Amino acid sequence: MKARFLISRFDLQLDTTPRLQEYSVDVPKGSTVLECLNIIKWTQDGTLTFRMSCRSAICGSCAMRLNGHAKLACKTQLSDVLIDGAVTVEPLGNFKVIKDLVVDMEPFWASLKRVKPWLKPDESVEYERERLQSIEGYKKIEDASTCILCASCYSDCNVLSVDERFLGPATLAKAQRFVYDSRDCDAEERLEYLGGANGVWDCTHCAECSTRCPTDAKPLERITELKAASMAHRIHGNNGARHVLAFRESIPGKYPGTGGGMINENYIPLRSVGIFNISGLLDLIPVGLRMFMRGKQPPMMPHYIKKFPEIRKMFSRFKEYLK
Amino acid sequence: MEDASCCGAGVVQEDNPKLGDALNARTFSLAEEQGLDIVTICSTCQGVMRRAQIKCENDPDYRAELNEDLMEDTGRAYQGTVKVKHFYEMIVEDFGLDNLAGKVTRKLTGLNIAPYYGCYALRPHEFSDVKIPDRPTALEETIEAVGATVVTWPEMQKCCGFPILMANKHNSLHLAGNVVEGAKKQGAACIMTACPLCHLNLDSYQPEIEKTFAMDLNLPILHYPQMLALALGATPEELKLDTHIVQAGNLLENLSSS
């Protein structure tokens, strides 16, 4: 079968912008994208540069963008990505390109280090042997443990595309693996850090990370678990956590006028910035005023659904459901 | 469904996932009681509800657990029969685009519309009902059915930033700005969105986006149903297009006669 490859070519030493170079390849049936790239490199163009190693989706080296989305070249059947007989191959996004499909991974490793990705034991105890994890305990960290650090999630993360300081999905998934490990003694301190600037609350849940993840690590799910752990540890001193509290209070109408089965859309932003946060509240005024002038503002009084008491009963199970 | 509650918007689910699922199971049970399926105009509601459904489908014990409490609290249970659809899916799959095109009284000829999918309708793929979630076609097909012109742009499946508006406003508005600017660069006269939360960020905050990032935008944002209604003959006044922050009332002036 003939297939066309539009491959991004770039050399940091020579080029200012990448260009797409077309290769036409006769590919054996059942080829992976990586096998095709090797055919090109070995038979057509030895200068084409990409990373690869294990060819079995375990080393994470060959992550690249196929038709604009991050994938492992070795785990992707060419037939699954061909559109009209062609596929576009580009380096991972959100990274500086060094050559062709090779990117500078340094910011990825640097981000990982920020969450201290190692187990911190209770130092007051003297352990006589290695500390085993129970099967139940392992289940809580099993998914995050499958991460192969391929950076597919980092590549397609929407927040990283506007803010390189964001810890990013792989790093946060790794943090979940330690926060949820019963042998680690630092959950509280870790959660304080993750709840701060560039942490879990900066994730916009675009779900690109979980969608592109080639393993079960699924960073968005892990980030959601970290947020739940933060809330359970009552780390509430930030807008993200207050926004969650706003929903917790609004849907069951905890205070008069805050909601009645449906949220009160006026209450949510006020509670999220903090009712005593003067500058935060002032910041809400322009948009509030704009919407008010146009008649776009939500109704002042919340909408009470008729069977509201049902919602209250369900919310009374809040603590029971967290167990 | 007068008694449906808030779906939790993914936020309750960050606090207490089981309670979030229970709220949605309750809504499903209400629809089932009436023998009806659920249609929502919001991608976020759809994404959150489909996720709750798929969790229940994949884990019958979990559904049974939720139902036990639901029975006690409401006297109803979620049978697992109700379908949840976005309004645009209903139009494309059930009503039919030929049918729609036949009812159009004001063809939107010459109007360049940028279809905006955002996130929840497509991702994570395992919770999406779109056949090839990286290459959806429903919004484009609807635009063509009402006689308008499709404008594609790189950010059409990117996040609008709304979910982090409260946590990190700067990043939120930056994401929104990129979406609007990208569509404008491709010659769009407006963006059409399938999610009211995207609408809120792209429309209500547009003046602030322009100021913060020195972008020149002024691009109207239409809801999917508003676009349909315009093609079906409704007036901008009826649709309250004048309540948009970026004025959308004069979009019809762009129509070319054909």
Image: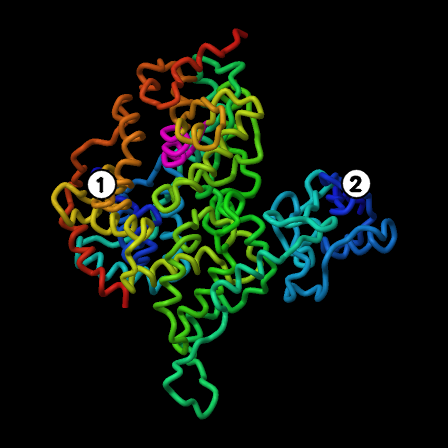
2 or 1: mark nearer the eye? 1
| Same-chain status of marks 2 and 1 | yes
Amino acid at the residue labelled 2: Glu
Which segment did they paint magenta? B192-205
Classed neighbour count for the residue bearing mark 2: other residues with Cα under 10 Å, few (<14), some (14–19), many (≥20): some
Q: Amino acid at mark 1?
A: Tyr
At which x and y percent is residue B255? 49, 11
Q: Residue at x 67, y 53 (%)?
A: A103
Q: Residue at x 40, y 17 (%)?
A: B230
Residue sitting farthest toward the bottom? A128
Read off the residue under disc 1.
A267
The residue to which callout 2 is attached is A22
What is the total number of numbered labels drawn onto the structure image? 2
In this view, the residue farthest toward the left is A256
Question: What percent of the width, then of the height, locates residue B29?
Answer: 26, 49
Q: Is residue A200 above or below residue B84?
A: below
Q: Is residue A30 visible?
A: no
> Does B97 lie within the magenta span?
no
Q: Is residue B2 visible?
A: yes
Majority secondary structure of magenta residues: helix
Q: Residue furthest front?
A: A279
- In-front residue for pair B116/A271: A271
Binning the other alpha carbons within 10 Å of mark 1 as few (below 14), some (14 to 19) or many (20 upward) gives: many
Residue A227: quadrant of the picture? bottom left
